[in-house]
Image (tube, coloured by chain):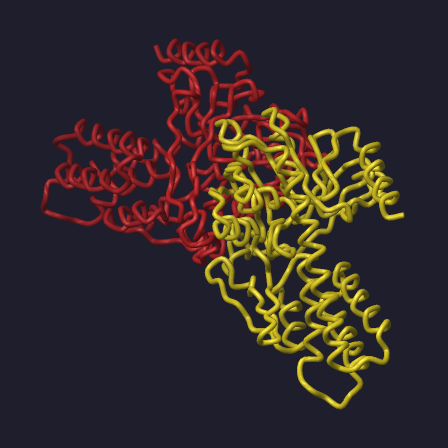
Chain colours: A red, B yellow
Amino acid sequence: MIPPLHWNDEAFRVDLLDQTRLPVEEHWLEIETPEAMAEAIRMLRVRGAPAIGIAAAYGVVLALRGEDAASPQQTALETIEMLAQTRPTAVNLFWALNRMREAVAAHPEVSRGALRNRLLEEARAIEAEDREAGRRLGAHGLTLFEDGMTVLTHCHAGGVATSGFGTALAPLLLAGDRGVRLRAYVDETRPLLQGSRITAWELGRAGVPATLITDSMAGHVMQQGRVDAVIVGADRIAANGDTANKIGTYTLAVLAHAHSLPFYVSAPVSTIDFDTPDGAAIVIEERASREVTHGFGRQTAPDGVAVYNPAFDVTPARLITAIITEHGVVRPPFEATLRVLRDERVAAAQ
Amino acid sequence: MIPPLHWNDEAFRVDLLDQTRLPVEEHWLEIETPEAMAEAIRMLRVRGAPAIGIAAAYGVVLALRGEDAASPQQTALETIEMLAQTRPTAVNLFWALNRMREAVAAHPEVSRGALRNRLLEEARAIEAEDREAGRRLGAHGLTLFEDGMTVLTHCHAGGVATSGFGTALAPLLLAGDRGVRLRAYVDETRPLLQGSRITAWELGRAGVPATLITDSMAGHVMQQGRVDAVIVGADRIAANGDTANKIGTYTLAVLAHAHSLPFYVSAPVSTIDFDTPDGAAIVIEERASREVTHGFGRQTAPDGVAVYNPAFDVTPARLITAIITEHGVVRPPFEATLRVLRDERVAAAQ
């Protein structure tokens, strides 16, 4: 398990891995104030939707660190507003801060110390629930792999983006504990190199034997029989199973199909968007051309060259062997099986 | 046409494009001595097998630039030996220098001025023959494309690697002259980025509308219907048509097949190795891991990470729609059609 942060109870602070210094340096920041946490979120020192939510929740706790004459409820609510400004499009951030806001609202009269304890409890619960979901996702995923297998993965959907287990990487990070030896090929994942910068570092840290390749080598390693399966995360899964994920995922799905290899998507149920009927309804974000032309602090393409830089692509459901969630593994026809998964959850919650 | 060098008759020198400064700067070197030419070859200022051969041939001419009491034949032969040391594995270099050596041997008694003229004539012939082959290759390739088409290409098999037309890029570079408008998507081609550094620059220089993408985007642009065909060069073509080319080529062939797009290999007949029965007999060169981990002057992967960095992959003949050569376009079954191409050439030469 590779968590992005640790609550340090003795020092009443958060020890937070500075992900911007990876992979060259594993540097831990000592975060003692909500302002320092806001800076860390804003500067992408902590990244990945679940990890941001957890970091923000602890950031609220830090507002009640010392003694102060002000109303602790008021201080906490102001801190929540401040932290909500750090990453304006991060849905998980608002979801976590809403839980903190509700915890404050439920205790309008308690003392500073009591509120502090209650908020710390809530932040820990948010972290623990995510960790438990990751553990269950990893356990479900592991049912698909056998000892000695090699999987190919793309981008980063691992521990430090969540509370420690990740999504696509959860089966790999959990395998060691279960006595299953898995190996990995890691796509570097241009343009932003999340694969080489973060996934390769994380698997090395977790003791999973990993080999780094450029994205263009994926077909070749499959052709050579070096890979048994492909596993990727998801940014959004449509109701029919069509999956939007980091650019390059679709190419891997086509390659896996051509080599008769299973292609797995691993994501929490919250990623499934039942209001999106299929992939055609998913708008592909285009990003700045400099990510391609000046990707590493150096200009590597001619001035003024036209660049196409889509952040995601859409893999059609017909190329997906199974979708791994924290509530189980579902297989085609996804239009039906994803709905069953949802209905079972709704029933279980009632 | 984008030639890598020009013979400057007035100044009796070679004006040579410094390819190491691309794509940021188009800097031309004034090469006046064989030593300066040797340095340019050694430092990859001129690269690509045909271009190196042509550069070395002109380098021999430069040995007779001024006046000197020494035997001009002796001077030329010593220069040929010196230039042969610059790139020890470049077959085209030795082939071109052999032609220069034979030209010296055929004129043992002539004056310095006469030998200089004869050697200049031979270097110009080597260049002109390569250019004519490139023009014919491009013309044959153009028969496969229609006005308004968009092709996707990988790595660099273009003008400055040859005498000006290239191989994979020859149809694109020739299209404008023939009134055919083609557009291109250019894979950046990790790890060494020949696509973004050289191909994108060259197509821009030739006025061919080109859009740069990362290698991982090729599947997505095909899925979106943005591409009509794929065209690549070749490092070696086996007798059955299996083709070794820059890593990533096989992935493109699988993608083209999955999208029912034609996949063309464009290469001179000299690339076909009839002594290699099929792709299984081709040894794949593995290169240093630093090309992947420190590709841009900055470390982008963790210390000590395992890296697999094959320089080439092999595309099986069954995924190749046609092979374009300077003697015509051949289609499957390549085992038979490549042999016919060879036999026709042998017959024509007799």
Residue B198 in picture, x, y percent from top left: 54, 53
What residue is at 70 percent from the left and 49 percent from the top? B133
Report which quarter residue A251 is drawn in. Answer: top right
Task: Confirm whether residue A285 shows in the render.
Answer: yes
Residue A175 in picture, x, y percent from top left: 59, 34
Between B234 and A265, the one lying in front of the other is B234
Quadrant of the image containing the C terminus of chain A:
top left
User: Is B198 displayed left or right of A240 in the figure?
Assistant: right
Q: In the rendered image of this protein, does residue A335 appear above or below residue B105?
A: above
Between A320 and A346, the one lying in front of the other is A320
| Farthest-out residue, bottom | B69
User: Is A307 displayed left or right of B316 in the figure?
Assistant: left
What residue is at 20 percent from the left and 44 percent from the top? A64
Report the number of numbered marks. 0
User: Is B236 displayed left or right of B27 in the figure?
Assistant: right
Task: Confirm whether residue A180 shows in the render.
Answer: no
